[in-house]
Image (cartoon, helix red, strand yellow):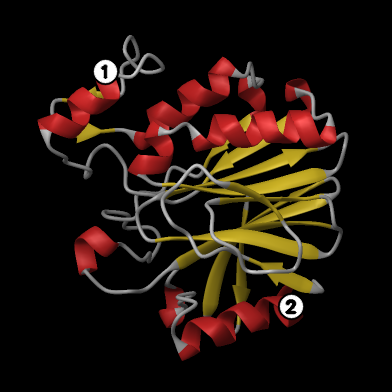
């Protein structure tokens, strides 16, 4: 991983053979809220900053709906494409961004996994979609978990903890400490269920709520509308 500075902004970049993964920060006031003028400008700037032809994103609805990118802004929470020089990404401000790369078939996916998407196993379902539509093999998958609110800061009600524990997928998995829920542990379990090689799973280990190393947007902390954007593109 490397830090990349563009103008007054800071990004975290991972260059892989055939693909780049980019995670924005809030350094310099960088914001990707697509409903604001600043956010729209930032999304357009990705084309010149990273040399891509298109920037794909969704109207996110906290679902398990997975979209194959067709140069349209649709409703859903995961995007998949095999188009080169096309960045696809997700907006977050505490939810978990997960970027997936099939290094053999050259297929990419960007997943927005809040508590609802995590409960509905959207990461696992996205991988299954890649298997079905693009013949992805799990041994070829690389997964990156981006900045999100960690277990240290994500206190929820016992009703939500019980909801997760009542799900067959998570019932025997250590996903919480009291009322503190770990979305990351849930997602790691989903990746484990698909037998993703542990060496191919990377975690930026950045808590959006309490990180001292990076400026981030956190809805729970700041109650504002700022958004991070995590995206991937095939070179």
Residue 71 is situated, as x and y percent measured from the top left of the image, at: 75, 68
The part of the image, by quadrant, that contains residue 160 is top left
Tell me if 146 is positioned left or right of 118 in this view: right
Vertical order, 147 against 93 (above or below): above
Residue 92 placed where, x, y %?
Answer: 43, 59
Badge number at residue 14: none
- From this viewpoint, is residue 176 visible? yes
Whether 150 is drawn above or below 190: the answer is below
Structural distance between the alpha carbons of marks 2 and 1: 44 Å
Q: Residue at x 36, y 42 (%)?
A: 116
Q: Which residue is mark 2?
A: 47
The residue most toward the top is 172
Q: Which mark is residue 166?
A: 1
Query: Is tag 2's residue or tag 1's residue first in the polypeptide sequence?
Result: 2
Label 2: how many residues lie within 10 Å, few (<14), some (14-19) or many (20+)?
Answer: some
Residue at the image point whose x is 45% and y is 47% from the top: 63
Q: Nearer the viewer, mark 2 or mark 1?
A: 1
Left or right relative to 19: residue 8 = left
């Amino acid at each position: 991983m490397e830090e990349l500075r563009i103008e007054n902004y800071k990004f975290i970049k991972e260059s892989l053979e055939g693909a780049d993964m980019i995670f924005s920060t809030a350094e310099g006031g960088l914001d990707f809220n697509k409903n604001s003028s600043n956010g729209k400008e930032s999304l357009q700037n990705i084309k010149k900053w990273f040399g891509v032809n298109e920037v794909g994103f969704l109207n996110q609805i906290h679902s398990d709906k997975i979209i194959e990118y067709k140069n349209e802004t649709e409703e859903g929470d995961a995007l998949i494409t095999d188009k080169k020089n096309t960045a696809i990404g997700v907006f977050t401000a505490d939810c978990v961004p997960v970027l997936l790369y099939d290094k053999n078939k050259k297929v990419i996916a960007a997943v927005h996994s809040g508590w609802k998407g995590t409960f509905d196993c959207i990461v696992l379902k996205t991988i299954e979609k890649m298997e079905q539509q693009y013949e992805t093999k799990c041994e070829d998958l690389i997964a990156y978990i981006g900045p999100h609110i960690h277990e240290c800061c994500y206190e929820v009600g016992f009703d939500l903890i019980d909801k997760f524990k009542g799900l067959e997928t998570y019932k025997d998995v250590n996903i919480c400490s009291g009322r503190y829920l770990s979305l990351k542990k849930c997602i790691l379990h989903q990746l484990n269920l698909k037998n993703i090689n542990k060496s191919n799973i990377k975690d930026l280990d950045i808590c959006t709520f309490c990180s001292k190393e990076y400026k981030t947007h956190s809805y729970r902390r700041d109650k504002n509308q700022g958004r991070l954007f995590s995206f991937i593109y095939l070179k």
